[in-house]
Amino acid sequence: MREEVKSKVEKLCYKSAILKYGGKLYQVERYKLTWDKLAIIATPKTLVIQANNIDQFLNEVELVSQSPLASKKPHVTEKFELQTDDFGAYNKLNSGLLKAFETVQKDEAFIPKAKQMCDIAQQIVNLEKTKLEILKMTR
């Protein structure tokens, strides 16, 4: 990998950096640069850029800012263990969405609130997908 490319990637991909690429914002958690690709673990979605497209990516990506809400790096262990409260959160979210579905069928005025609930649920799903990507990258 060329040192010039490596240097540019290091300047862009620091923890909590906000990148704008393809008209979307991504908050960087970490990155991995190998001979064949650049993988940027970010919220809401991981970016994987093949080696032959890295120069084009670096020309198109824009560093917006560092997030003021930088969170500490999650501790990843070798073995993934599911905690009991993971299911509790899932069950609570699932039952809340089902209740919202039933309420929308009875009361159309509830639709805007139901849409907000779905947006929040989608963000939770995106965060969980990011956690899975982090686990995949550390193995």
Image (cartoon, rainbow, N blue to C red):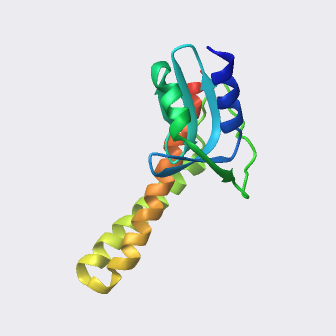
Query: x%, y% of residue 32?
Result: 62, 25
Which image quadrant is residue 98 in?
Answer: bottom left
Q: Residue at x 44, y 46 (%)?
A: 22
13 or 91, which lies in front?
A: 13
93 or 62, which lies in front?
A: 62
In this picture, residue 110 sits left or right of residue 21: left
Q: Residue at x 63, y 15 (%)?
A: 2
Q: Is residue 97 above or below residue 10?
A: below
In this picture, residue 74 sits left or right of residue 126: right
Residue 43, visible in the rendered structure: yes
In this picture, residue 1 sits left or right of residue 46: right
Say which quadrant the N terminus sits in.
top right
Q: Is residue 125 above or below residue 41?
A: below
123 or 38, which lies in front?
A: 38
Which image quadrant is residue 9 in?
Answer: top right
Q: Is residue 129 above or below residue 48?
A: below
3 or 100, which lies in front?
A: 3
Residue 13, visible in the rendered structure: no
Q: Residue at x 65, y 35 (%)?
A: 30
Give the total of numbered labels: 0
Query: x%, y% of residue 69?
Result: 72, 57
Say which quadrant the C terminus sits in.
top right
Query: x%, y% of residue 60?
Result: 51, 40
Query: x%, y% of residue 46?
Result: 51, 37
Q: Residue at x 73, y 50 (%)?
A: 71
